[in-house]
Amino acid sequence: MTTSDSAISVRNLWKVFGPTPNAIVGTPDANLSRPELLEKTGCVAAVNNVSFDVADGEVFVVMGLSGSGKSTLVRCLTRLIEPTSGEVFIEGEDILAASKSRLRELRRTKFSMVFQHFGLLPHRSIIDNIAYSLEVNGVKKDKRHARANEVIELVGLSGYANHYPEQLSGGMQQRVGLARALAVDPEVMFLDEPFSALDPLIRRDMQNEIVRLHDDLNKTMVFITHDLAEAMRIGDRIAIMRDGAIVQVGTPTELVLNPADDYVSDFTNDIPKSHVLRVADIAVPISGGHASSSQPIPHDAIVRSVMHRVMSDPDPISIAKNGEIIGCIGRDELLTVFAEDINEELNA
Amino acid sequence: MKAYIDTHVPEFLRRKWVLIVGLLVVWFVLGRIFKGVHTLDIGNSEDTPTTEVLGQFAANIRAARAENPIFVYIFNPFRQGIESFVEVIRAVISDPAPGALIPVIGWVGILAFIGFIVFATSNWRTSLLSMVLIFGCGVLGMWTYSMDTLALTIGAVVLSLVIALPIGIWAGLNDRVMKTVRPVLDLAQILPTLVYLAPLALVFLIGIAASTIATMIYSIPIGIRITAHAIRSLQNGPIEAAESMGSTRWQKLTKVQLPMAKRTIILGVNQTTLAALSFVVIAALIGAPGLGEPVLQALSIRNIGDGVTAGLAVVFIAVMLDRSTTAAVVHSNQIPLTGKPLLVRRLSLGAAAIATIVAIMISRQQLWAAVFPESLDFRDPIGNWFDAITEWFTTTFYFLTTSFNEVFTLNILNPIEYLLADAPWYLTIIMISVIAAIIGGRTVAILSAILLLLIVWIGLWNDTMITLTQVLIATTIVMLIGVVLGVAAGRNAKFERILKPFLDAGQTLPAFVYLVPVLALFGPTRFAAIVCGVFYAAPVVVRVVADGVRGVPKEMVEAAIASGSSTTQVVTKVQLPASKKSLLLGANQGLIFVLAVVVIGGLVGAGGLGYLVLQGASKPELQGKGLAAGLAIVLLGIVMDRIAHASARRS
Ligand SMILES: Nc1ncnc2c1ncn2[C@@H]1O[C@H](COP(=O)(O)OP(=O)(O)OP(=O)(O)O)[C@@H](O)[C@H]1O
Ligand SMILES: [Mg+2]
């Protein structure tokens, strides 16, 4: 089943909490809705038959309402929570079949995780928190401190190495959590709402840092967030979860253009379409010689960014992809998108 | 249909307390009619079939000590091991080797050493306080007794922790282990201290070993409980994070869980230590050397002055142990020093260490530093002074002490005792079981009936009822005090601050030290035992009630005030009902604490089961009866605990 080029491959993953976790999957009960299942069996399917693939170097974002199972899902991927059933492959390796010691080795060197509630060790200084995974892996003290100092720098906490978590603000603690995850130079990172406690400015810095890690170091990431703007900014693809199941997976544009249902569109409505859509998404075929003679627009330009050019040209402007003209975009197409945005805004 | 029922069963009859009051009236009337019938009263030295069997059993054990393989290969070596461990500590601080004048270290050295240990684990202020308190024990003329008590306490605490910490950690990590040890811990909590003593003395002989083992049995459960709780109540976040970074189980335990739990575990050490101290004092009953000896002597010859002086030394040691371990908790919770403060701390620690070594060497060579000087010993003047105060107080406040005692005894104590003890035993059992059924349900009622029948079978029914009377009265008083002070403290932070030192003191002091002043004021009476029980149990109950009242959601109280309730209405209609759970928990704790002390009241003339236990400990021919009385105390404790528990669960 696994595709060799995907970094993470998840198939039919279940996690059932409750008195009889093993008596749900594969029975008719598995099809019940969450309240019905709870009523009947006292169990909650926190992760409900989830399958997806994450490509090497992709940033895969998971969104969903509180309680929809995001944290549980991401914990199941590294077996911090044992899944009830299903398959998880990371870089081709069957994680659920891994022995305890193999799993430890993977956690020490290949994966790392950033936690929603930080999970810093209160009795250790910042530097020892960050060096912890190197320490348990037997790295000598001066070496691991040198590495820890590098990442402390990276997240902008220089000068705080010898402080203790309780002496830091929530946002700073969250950055320690991020630094700790970066310290081992992992191949795959799991981030559970890593920026929720940050102020907007630092948040943007950190988002840029993630984008940079992604672009430069080609890290694969599973990133949980509540914030759609954040998801759009850093995510290659977004999965929307509800009651433990994935409702839809797609690029930001796909979700905005073709929401699978009201639940998904509720998420995407907040974002003006003109901020997400790319010109190629709304391009129309060139009919006759109507297209403007001016320079073509690249196909992946965000609609909003070309507003000025399109509006000031009476003719539609052509759109190029890899040097080939694939269509054009004119005032009408643009205005349709803006009109929808304004409509949304008025409704809200 | 519903309306029909409502009209035929009057509202008031469906209330539990109306039923109970009705039952009490019936009970009282029947008790009067059948007064003195089938009370199962037996003479003081009269045996019953069961006590005879137990007496024979005790005699067999005594005879078997020298030959039986269980004794020769298990109990006796175990006893000797523990005894020599404690004797080593005694040899260092309290008990001179044969032919020597002083123990290994003289008093100045001990003082310096204690100061150093406390300084190293907390701060210089607590260190100074500790030294002053220990010095105070010398001024009271109790130096050697105090050092004996300290030695036994330290020995028992070390041995207890060696057992309690690993088990506690294990039980904290593993649910199955917790489930296995929990019933044992629960039982240990309700067993009155007095009942361990005789059986242990029987197996391990009177003396240091039996005292230490008894103390360990008392304090180990406390250590286990708090350690397990320390591990269990850790936040999961950091532990999960450590797991996500690939820690082995051992790394997780040593690098994350234990350091995070350290604070609570040290608190466990504090509680274990105080429990051990209070028991070491009581263990004088089975030959433990130390401050319990003069207290016991004072009780038996009513030498109030000396008893109070010794009690004061116990208080000093208790405060010293409490303050120093509490300060260690605070210290362990501080962020480690760095830079200059760290250097200063290291230098002063070094200086203190050198001073301590010097003091120890001097104390081994100079007489003035070796033996606590007589010129500083004020035992007799202080004793006389206490005697004078007692004399003055009892004559001046005659109405408070003797008259109050008499009025109380005639009008409250005696009628209730008649009700329980002077009625036919089956009437009492039926009534108690029915009341248990009303407040706790059928299961508890059946259990109570069975356990009470067992007491009848043992043959100590009448004495059990005498003890029960005192326990019930003392618990009622404790609850009244607990509710009044607890509500006040729960509502008013300032009042709570005023009360706190008293509550702290009440919970720190060994029960034994209350006996002497109470005996001085009220003489050897049942009333004295009740007063002791009240003093001992009230602080706990006040605390539990105050916590409960404080825990009532603010919005609830505000809503009541907003809808125009008076203060009384807020208390009676909102705060008390909402904290019912705490009240019942308080009552349960109160019962257990009171029972523990009331039986010790046998020492101050309270009669009942406690007296039989004590008698059994001193007279071999009454040993069977003493053991039987211990058994009856356990059964009675279980009955009361279960009823209280069940009623708490039902609410
Ligand atoms: N240990 C557990 N035992 C029982 N139920 C659990 C447990 N952990 C999670 N759940 C349940 O599983 C569901 C999913 O929880 P989860 O923490 O994964 O949600 P989430 O999407 O991360 O929410 P949030 O956005 O608030 O962090 C919830 O209904 C929760 O009650
Ligand atoms: Mg979550």
Image (cartoon, helix red, strand yellow):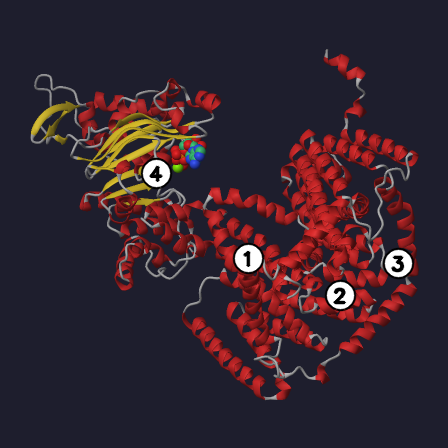
Q: Residues within 10 Å of mark 4 (few under 14, many from 20)?
A: many
Q: Are marks 1 and 3 in contact (CB under 8 Å)?
A: no
Residue located 40% across and 29% down the image = A21
Image vertical order of residue A142 relative to residue B35, above or below:
below
Residue indicated by mark 4: A75
Q: Residues within 10 Å of mark 2 (few under 14, many from 20)?
A: many
Disc 4 and disc 2 on one polypeptide chain: no
Corner quadrant of residue B508 = bottom right
Residue indicated by mark 3: B401
Mark 2 belongs to which amino acid? Answer: Leu
Nearest to N terminus: mark 2 or mark 3 = 2
Q: Secondary structure at mark 1?
A: helix
**Side of A342 relative to B386 (left or right):** left
**Is the CB atom of the residue marked by disc 4 within 8 angstroms of ligand 1's nearest atom?**
yes
**Is the CB atom of the residue marked by disc 2 within 8 angstroms of ligand 1's nearest atom?**
no
- Give ligand 2's quarter of the image: top left
Residue indicated by mark 2: B296
Residue indicated by mark 1: B69
Question: Which mark is nearer the camera, 4 or 3?
Answer: 3
Q: Secondary structure at mark 3?
A: helix
Question: Which mark is nearer the camera, 1 or 2?
Answer: 1
Question: Which mark is nearer the camera, 1 or 4?
Answer: 1
Corner quadrant of residue B560 = top right
Residue A267 position in % (x across, y down): 35, 28
Q: Is residue B199 visible?
A: no
Q: Is residue B37 visible?
A: yes
Mark 3 belongs to which amino acid? Answer: Thr
